[in-house]
Amino acid sequence: MWSLGRGPGNRSDTEEEHATDFAAEIEAFLASFSPAETTVMRHAFRAILEGAPATTADLRTASGLPGPVVEEAVRRLLERGTLVAEAGRITGSRGLSLTESPHRLVLAGRLRYAFCAVDAVGIPVALGVEATIDSRCHHCRRPLHLEIRDGAVTEAPPGLTIWAVERDLTRSLRAHT
């Protein structure tokens, strides 16, 4: 979630404590996936990054996992909100999507969308690619434009804050932003 003012509540914690807490939440979230779920998400993410939705058949081929294992992993990931599917094709994985969302992301010249504000910044930084992000402030709906170069935000509105609401660690941030 983007905010051009303060984040939620009047917290007295330091920014470093918030970052440490958030990092711990992300680590716990990622550790909650089975090896098969992690493999399925990774292959779906790669397909989406290249611009193609993935089917369970695509994921079986790419992963080498048995069909029932892939199908169960896909079912659980859809249930948790970590994958997104339309018409039987996976169009979103690990925060990256082909389906339009409020977080428009151009990665190395390719239009994609992000599940949430954290993904919009984190994906290009993690991939080490140049990106532009167009979104809106969650509170005032003002348009936001960010640019990422060399693993860092190089252009952003003054006072921009990204924050995540308190949430169920078993589910994706997508449902909260």
Image (tube, helix red, strand yellow):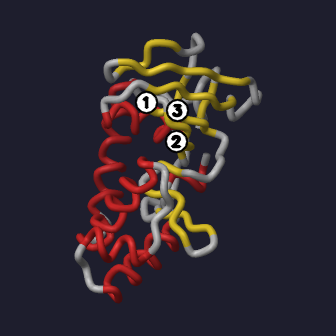
For the residue marked with disc 3, what is the amino acid? Val
Question: Looking at the picture, which amino acid does disc 1 mark?
Answer: Ala
Residue at the spot 36% in from the left edge and 50% down from the top edge: 25
Q: Residues within 10 Å of mark 2 (few under 14, many from 20)?
A: some
Q: CA distance from mark 1 to mark 2?
A: 26 Å
Q: Position of residue 56 (x, y in %)?
A: 42, 76
Residue 96 in the image: above or below residue 148: below
The residue type indicated by label 2 comes to Ala
Residue 157 image-quadrant placement: top right
CB under 8 Å between callouts 1 and 3? no
- Could you tell me how far apart the alpha carbons at marks 2 and 3 are, in whole angstroms? 22 Å
Where is residue 91 shown, x and y percent of the image?
A: 54, 60
As helix, strand or loop, the secondary structure at mark 2 comes to: loop
The residue lying toward the viewer, choosing from 98 and 148, is: 98
Q: Which residue is mark 2?
A: 164
Residue drawn 23% across and 70% down? 35
Q: CA distance from mark 1 to mark 3?
A: 6 Å
Residue sitting at x 35%, y 79%: 70
Disc number placed over residue 106 in the picture, else none: 3
| Residue 62 shown left or right of residue 89 in the figure | left
Residue wearing tag 1: 108
